[in-house]
Image: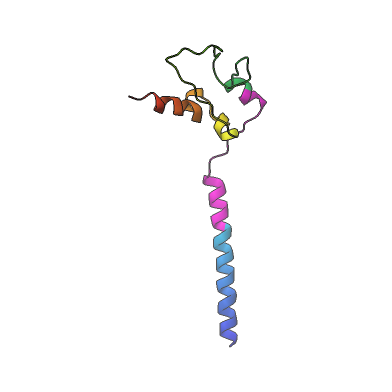
Amino acid sequence: MKQLGVNFLVLGCTLILLLVLLEVSVRVLDSPEKEIDKDWVHQFVKCNQDGFRDREILVAKPRDKFRILVVGDSQTFGHGIEALEDTIPKQLIKYSTRG
C-alpha cells in the first residue's frame, strides 16, 4: 500500500513538472502580441471627415454605384489591421465587384 502512495506522489510530481515545462515553452516560443496604442492608431488609421475609416466619400451617389454599410465592432473597424484594404468592409467591396 505504501508503494502505491509513492507511485501516486511520483506521478503527481511528474505531471506538475510537465505542465510547468509546457507553460514555460509556450511563453518562450509564442510571439509577442502587437501593441496597439495611440502611436499605432495615428500611424495606420486615417479617418475621413465623417469619422469613418475610409477615404473621402461624396454625399451624392452616382446611379451606377451602390454602397455597403457595415455595422460592427472593433473587428469590423479593423482594429490591429494596418492596411485599409484588408478590413472586412473593403474585402466585402472586393468580393462584390468580382464579375
Q: Position of residue 96 (x, y in %)?
A: 40, 26
Residue projecting furthest to the left:
99
Q: Position of residue 49 (x, y in %)?
A: 63, 14
Magenta span covers which residues?
21-41
Q: Quarter holding the N terminus?
A: bottom right
| Number of marks present in the image shown | 0
The residue lying at 53 percent from left, 51 percent from top is: 25
Residue 89 vertical placement versus 29 (above, below): above
Residue 14 vertical placement versus 30 (above, below): below
Residue projecting furthest to the front:
63
Q: Quarter holding the C terminus?
A: top left
The residue lying at 56 percent from left, 34 percent from top is: 75
Q: Foreground: 52 or 46?
A: 52
Q: Foreground: 19 or 38?
A: 38
* Scheme by which the image is coloured: rainbow
Q: Quadrant of residue 76?
A: top right
The residue lying at 65 percent from left, 29 percent from top is: 37
Report the predominant secondary structure element of the magenta stretch: helix
Q: Foreground: 36 or 9?
A: 36
- Magenta-span inclusion, residue 40: yes
Residue projecting furthest to the bottom:
1
- Magenta-span inclusion, residue 76: no
Q: Position of residue 56 (x, y in %)?
A: 56, 13
Q: Quadrant of residue 19?
A: bottom right
Q: Foreground: 5 or 77?
A: 77
Q: Position of residue 45 (x, y in %)?
A: 59, 22
